[in-house]
Amino acid sequence: MLQLTRFTTVYEPMQDRLALTGRDAGGHGVTIWLTQRFALRLLPTLFAQLDRSGPAQAVRPNVSAVAPDALRAQAVQAFRQQAARAQQPRLEPVRPHPDSHFELLATEARLGRQGPGLRVLFLGAAGEAAALVLLPLELRQWLDIVHRHWRNAEWPLTIWPAWIVTAAAPAAAGRGYAH
């Protein structure tokens, strides 16, 4: 199993999937493929990790139906999301190395704590595995990148909580995110 130290996330239109290409401290690499169906199950759990007031709420057309406490919590989360976006580093993308690289179609994810970070273990059908650890700021930055690619892919936006949608800039998705 690889413990990724850096990774890049891109949307691959020909595959209609997200690709996380990363490497561990030893230079071994992996591309983790995330289908929309898989991401629809994973993302709400990740949102809840950052949403202190409980499960994340999807965008609602009738904002007046949201309680004042929920609006306040969404505003705080949107502010934190905007701050994370502003601190997002611009790094060279991680590229696959042909000699020490494998691919994994994620079929399961297991979440757990590792120090102050969230450990996400991606598992494939054939038993392959790769993990990454994200501090809260890094998780916010990664979700921002995934959201931009999600919009670029023209996948349904209803899964995204209001605090991410509010914080998102109208610009199109970038080429990727390197961590």
Image: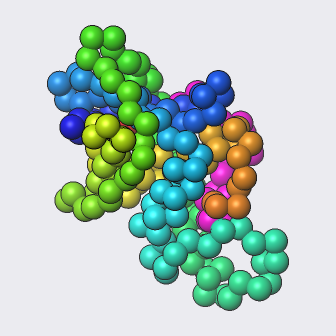
Is 129 above or below relative to 112?
A: above
Quadrant of the rendered structure where residue 104 is? top left
Which quadrant of the rendered structure holds the C terminus? top left
Whole-percent x, y for residue 156 in the image: 72, 52
**Drawn side of residue 123 relative to residue 2, left or right:** right
Tell me the residue at 61%/87% (across/down): 69
Which residue is most to the top? 99
Whole-percent x, y for residue 30 in the image: 34, 28
Color encoding of the figure:
rainbow
Tell me the residue at 41%/67% (across/down): 49
Tell me the residue at 71%/84% (across/down): 66
Residue 37 colored in magenta in the image: no
Whole-percent x, y for residue 147 in the image: 61, 48
Quadrant of the rendered structure where residue 61 is? bottom right
Is 163 above or below relative to 88?
A: below
Q: How many marks?
A: 0
Most foreground residue, 108 or 55: 108
Residue 170 colored in magenta in the image: yes
Tell me the residue at 26%/17% (across/down): 100
Is 72 above or below relative to 3?
A: below
Most foreground residue, 101 or 134: 101
**Drawn side of residue 3 relative to residue 69, left or right:** left
Q: Is residue 134 among the parts visible in the rendering?
A: no
Magenta-drawn segment: 161-177
Q: Is residue 69 among the parts visible in the rendering?
A: yes
Whole-percent x, y for residue 101 in the image: 31, 20
Which residue is most to the front? 126
Which quadrant of the rendered structure holds the N terminus? top left
